[in-house]
Every structure is written in structure tokens, then in C-alpha cells.
Amino acid sequence: MNFRTQVELPKKEAEIRHSDRIMLFGSCFAENIGNLLLENKFRCDVNPFGILYNPLSVVEALWQILSRKVYTEKDLFCAGGIWHSWMHHSVFSDNTASACLVSINKRLAQAATELPELDWLVITWGTAFAYRLEGNHRVVGNCHKQPESLFVRKLLTIREIVTEWNCVLTELRKINPSLKILFTVSPIRHIKDGMHGNQISKSTLLVAAEEICQSWSDCYYFPSYEIMMDELRDYRFYADDMLHPSSLAVSYLWECFSECYFSKDTERIMKEWEEIRKAVNHKPFHAQSEAYRKFLTQIVLKIERFKENFPYFDLQKELEQCQARLKI
């Protein structure tokens, strides 16, 4: 007997390799997947604007990268002594405008350099509700807990989303014809939209993603929302807030993601790296012992051998970590 409904995963139409360059945009789930990719030594840039929730905010972020926008103080606002950008998450906010601008423009310049060389763009949409500034109707990426009177809240239509994304995808193809785009809808429920509103929002995103993927042969869809709702519907798979996936659920979604987009060779490389990563993070009882020094020497050799086989792996941090311990 089977006691759960299993979501049919997409066939392996495309492969994500360690040598690929990847950029991720979107909600908290983009951070979950992005951090796991980084942990497994994929070459990723995760959320150059910080967490973004709705499709039009992500489109605006892409246009700003494409145009190589440089932020100035007039693009910021100050509230409670902290400088913010309407398009950026609060991780970019700072006590001074200059410090805020440095972090914003550094990530923008990095993303603009990377975009033409990317192999994959991974997009996670969280909600179809968008906030626009009252007066200029400009879509914002983050409200920074400012008064509701400053914004107009609107449920985006499927047509709006598809039209805006078709425009930006056309432009992306001009600078990077081989770019592949992977869409997913975040499994995180937006309780502020209301439970019915959340369902309307998610269904809008699902239909919009389907339309885009039907129109573009190199656009793909991964069913993270469906897996969470159908396979992991029990509350034991949720975090304490009963809205976000638990660490166990994220691990299962990662397994499904791996099954869809990683080859056997990629999985083998990941397994090899995991053994080295665990060894690097091992905490000995006697850090000064000769046995531990031999253990570290072996790890260094493994890292150097791994680097020779896979030159695109960035292993400098782990190598320096081991070498620093050997000098103690």
C-alpha cells in the first residue's frame, strides 16, 4: 500500500553541472536551494538584490542588471536613521547612504558581469501580490515595514506577468543566447494574503509559469510547491511557524531537485566533496596531536587532488582552513 500521493517529477530535459554558472532570484526558497548549491560547490550568485517575492520585482531587478544601473543617493530613502532601497532586501540597508550604496553597487556590478556568461537562471516566485509606491506606481521589492498608506497593493494578472517576462527574456537572449531558465513557485505560504488569497496568488503564478515554459523551449519548471502541498502535506514537514518548510522538507525537495537536474557523474562528485567537507569540519578531541596533523595533511592532499580534477571548484577557503590548523 502507498500512503501518499507522489508528484511526478519532470524528465531530465537539461542538466546542471558544477562547471555551470548559476544565478538565483526570488523568495526564501531560492535562498534554501542556493545555499545548498553553494555548499555542494556549484558556482552560484544567490539573490543579488536579496530576497524578492513577486515576478515583477524580479523582472525589475533583471532590467537594472541588464542596463548596468548605478545607484545614487536619490535612489535611497532614510527611515529611522537607516538608509534603504525600495528594490533591495534589508540586508543591504545601512546607517549611512554611502555604505548602503557601496554594497548595492558592488553586487549590481558583479551580477552585470556574470549575466552574459550564465548557464542557468533559477527563479522562485513567492506571491503574485505586488506593492507599488503611491504616486509613481513603481513596483517595490521590499516595503521595509513602512506605512501601508505609501503603497498600492495589487494582485498581478497572468497576462501582466507573462508579458513582462517575455520582454525581459527576449532581451536576455540577445546577450546570452544559450541561457536556460528554471522557474519554480515557492512552497512557503503567504499568510498575510489570507489563506484563500494565498491560493489565488499561487495559482496565478503556476499558470503564468506554465505559459512561459510553453512559449520558450529553454525554460523549465520544477514543482517545489506541488511536492510540498501533496507529498509533504503533513504539518511535521513544516517549521514552527507552520508556513515555511522544515529542514527535513528542504532536504527532501533538494533530493527531488537533484534527481531532476543532476547526472550520475555530478552526484558522484557531490558525494566525493561531501566526504572532504565533513573531514574539514571535523572537530578533534586533541587538536595538537600528531595523529590529527597527519589527518589534516591527508585532507590537504585530497583538496589539492580534487582541485586538479575540477579546476572550476573554489576550494581556497577550505585549503587555508586546513593549512592554518597545521601551523598551530
Image: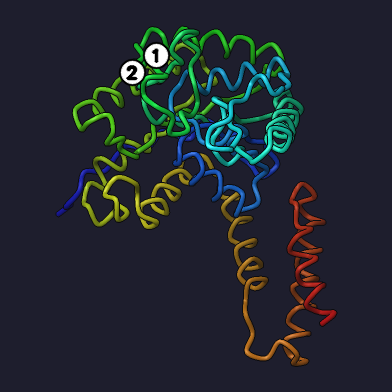
Name which residue type carries label 1. Glu
Q: How many marks?
A: 2
As drawn, which residue projects farthest toward the front?
81
Q: Residue 138: x and y, percent?
A: 50, 13
| Foreground pick, 282 / 145 | 145
Image: 81 above or below 58: below
Side (left or right) of 26 relative to 224:
right
Q: Which mark is residue 211?
A: 1
Q: Residue 264: x and y, percent?
A: 56, 50
Side (left or right) of 86 relative to 200:
right
Image: 265 above or below 114: below
Q: Which mark is residue 207?
A: 2
| Foreground pick, 139 / 161 | 139
Q: Residue 79: x and y, percent?
A: 53, 32
Q: Secondary structure at mark 2?
A: helix
Q: Residue at x 55, y 44 (%)?
A: 34
Q: Residue 322: x and y, percent?
A: 77, 72
Q: Residue at x 37, y 15 (%)?
A: 152
